[in-house]
């Protein structure tokens, strides 16, 4: 029994890592689909068939690195270090302002702010007067600030 404990711990750690990779790979929208599919694992039908879609109202921001081809020519092999530094700043800012970084296109980044979640934050603001650190009641303003 004591020999099984490290193996169980390793298995739990592996499952958590796989879950994290699925969350990153499928993004915020895909996370609910994965969760529903996992909840349906005990049914006879395939867990991921016929899961209904869900309409989401969101504000999207496309953040572009200007003159990326020129930057690539100048930095050559160091261009990925440069892009990773920019990605770190973008991800930090988007997360700080309650958005979700969605995709990297090489010279551009896509981020989104779900309006329905932000509307709930506005309701919280109206009742408590607090949205948490760095939050503004207007979603569009938050996107521009980020």
Image (tube, helix red, strand yellow):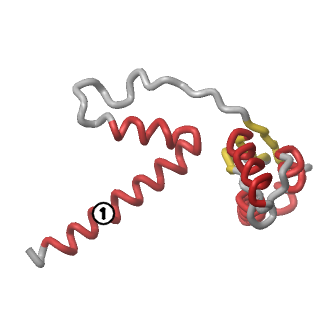
Q: Is residue 35 visible?
A: yes
Location of the C terminus (image quadrant): bottom right
What element does badge 1 sit on?
A: helix
> Which residue is at the front of the view, 22 or 58?
58
Q: Is residue 2 left or right of residue 21?
A: left
Residue 101 drawn above or below residue 48: below
Residue in the picture at 54% in, 25% down: 53
Residue 145 drawn above or below residue 88: above
Residue in the picture at 34% in, 57% down: 15
Residue 33 placement (x, y as % from top left): 47, 36
Residue 49 placement (x, y as % from top left): 38, 24
- Of all residues, the one furthest to the front in this rendering is 127
Residue 10 drawn above or below residue 23: below
Q: Is residue 76 visible?
A: no
Q: Which residue is mark 1?
A: 12
- Of all residues, the one furthest to the left in this rendering is 1
Location of the N terminus (image quadrant): bottom left
Residue 84 placement (x, y as % from top left): 71, 62
Residue 136 placement (x, y as % from top left): 84, 55
Residue in the picture at 77% in, 64% down: 89
Residue in the picture at 77% in, 58% down: 97
> Which residue is at the front of the view, 134 or 105?
134
Can you tell which quarter of the image residue 87 is in? bottom right
Can you tell which quarter of the image residue 11 is in? bottom left
Q: Is residue 112 left or right of residue 5?
A: right
């Amino acid at each position: 029994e004591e020999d099984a404990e490290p193996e169980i711990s390793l298995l739990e750690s592996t499952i958590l890592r796989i879950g994290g990779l699925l969350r990153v790979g499928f993004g915020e929208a895909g996370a609910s689909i994965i969760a529903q599919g996992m909840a349906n694992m005990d049914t006879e039908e395939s867990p991921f068939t016929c899961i209904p879609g869900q309409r989401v109202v969101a504000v999207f921001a496309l953040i572009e690195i200007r003159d990326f081809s020129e930057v690539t020519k100048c930095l050559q092999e160091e261009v990925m270090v440069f892009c990773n530094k920019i990605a770190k700043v973008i991800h930090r800012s988007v997360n700080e302002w309650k958005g979700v970084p969605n995709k990297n296109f090489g010279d551009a980044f896509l981020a989104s702010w779900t309006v329905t979640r932000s509307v709930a934050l506005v309701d919280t603001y109206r009742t408590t007067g607090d949205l948490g650190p760095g939050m503004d009641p207007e979603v569009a303003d938050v996107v521009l600030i980020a």
